[in-house]
Amino acid sequence: MRESIYYGTHTRRHFASEGAEPSPWAGKKVLIVGMARSGVALAQLLCREGAMVTVNDMKDADAFGDKLDVLKEQPVCFRLGEDGIDALQGKDMLIISPGVPIDAPIVKAAKATGIPVSGELEIASRIAKGTLVAVTGTNGKTTTVSLLGAIFREAGKIAYVAGNIGYPLSAAAMESKYNDVLVAEVSSFQLETTDTFHPLTAAVLNVTEDHLNRHGTMEVYTALKRHIFDAQDEKDFAVLNYEDEACRKMAEGLKSRVLFFSRLHEVDQGAFVRDGQIVIRIGGEEKTICNADEIYIPGPHNLENALAAAAIAFSRGVPGPVIRHALRTFKGVEHRIEFVRELDGVRYINDSKGTNVDSTIKAVQSMKAPTAIILGGYDKHVSFAPLAEEIAKTPLIENCVIIGATGDQIEQALKTVGYEHIHRADTLEDAVNRCRALSQIGGNVLLSPACASFDMFSDYEQRGRIFKDIVNRLK
């Protein structure tokens, strides 16, 4: 069903102050495809900038409930319940949300007629004011950007943690000022449509197998991650994981200044651990920050996240004592190795953000007590062999309870390495109850699925919230 509805009768222009230059977006005819959070925020932002905005989604209006109501006070044309190709006519630009593949029919149609194609992150970064830093990688992004937000706020800055974390950069761009800091979590989906995206400091935390159902090969996926540095120059900083071979190779040919972080080796420039202490060295300046064991959030992967965050913050002028205090007090993020409850001597841990194999391996390595783990979910066409091998060599993982579309694949991977303590469940609640029955006093129940959630839930956040609700209702 097609809907073509304008709310408002004129194009609004946004001026920073009386007599200021009009926005370069004023009067531009823009089609935004994909009405998830980032698409809605971008439509609001571009309306404020004076663009003539049309929004499109294959879903019809009823599917959104009240989520589009914020646009009904804006001069927006709605084209819902259709593929949007007809709406391309006469447009100056097509902007796609991260969930829209770069090879979608509407993208091909735009390119065939010479209409430029961009993404929400790219456009928001052009409009936003303030210092932009950005973090990508397969795992650890949300923890690292959240920690960075805490560090910058501790330093007295107004800091917006935005992007792939669930708060769109477009929303932050509507609020930010020149003295603020924007900390962007960036996904490979978003990097597909960036061109001038220019963080002054950018980091790639790690690169492991993920999203091959969309990107096809590891070579393409890795190249997209490296793309975060392409607009940087010699005044900027690129922060890379020295222990990750794919990251280490990214340093070759970069225009920006390279900072490595490492928990195992002392690096020439960057953040590292020496004699149990976190040290940062940039240029001729070296600072000891704190003892590595003072970091509040546990696990070797979180030490790496802390090193990356410390290097980024120090590169932007944050003093060492400020970084130290944030590392000592930051308590982590929801859905990432998040303690939920202890019942009958068993600790329940929500790691719903464990949406790929490497992330769940890190969660497994963080367990310090006998653990029953819940695995399984949406199929992203990756191998579960590395996870199965880690579980098989980790005696503390006493039981695996499997749910979701990837159940057969995970079970086969575990059996191949000789692991036998496998149980199947039909629902998440069934899985929690099975884990409870299998656990003893002093043990853990860990939700870390190693998969996306889309086979059973809307996203990993909903999966995590439902897990916590199930756990908190246990008697």
Image (cartoon, rainbow, N blue to C red):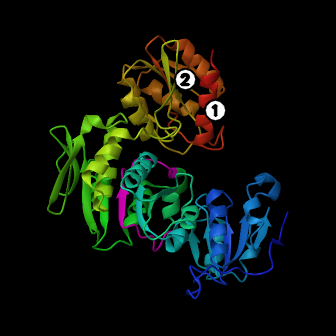
Disc 2 secondary structure class: strand
Circle 1 residue: 466
The C terminus is located in which quarter? Answer: top right
| Number of the front mark, 1 or 2 | 1
Check if residue 194 falls in the magenta segment. yes
- Whether residue 425 appears in this view of the structure is no
- Residue 262 screen position, x and y as percent: 24, 47
Circle 2 residue: 401
Image position of 348 with respect to 220: above or below: above
- The residue stretch that appears in magenta: 193-212
- Residue 376 screen position, x and y as percent: 56, 33
Marks 1 and 2, the one that precedes in the sequence = 2
Total marks shown come to: 2
Residue 222, by quadrant, is: bottom left
Neighbor class of circle 2 (other Cα within 10 Å; few <14, some 14-19, many 20+) is many
* Amino acid at pointer 1: Ile
Marks 1/2: CA distance?
17 Å
Image position of 162 with respect to 370: above or below: below
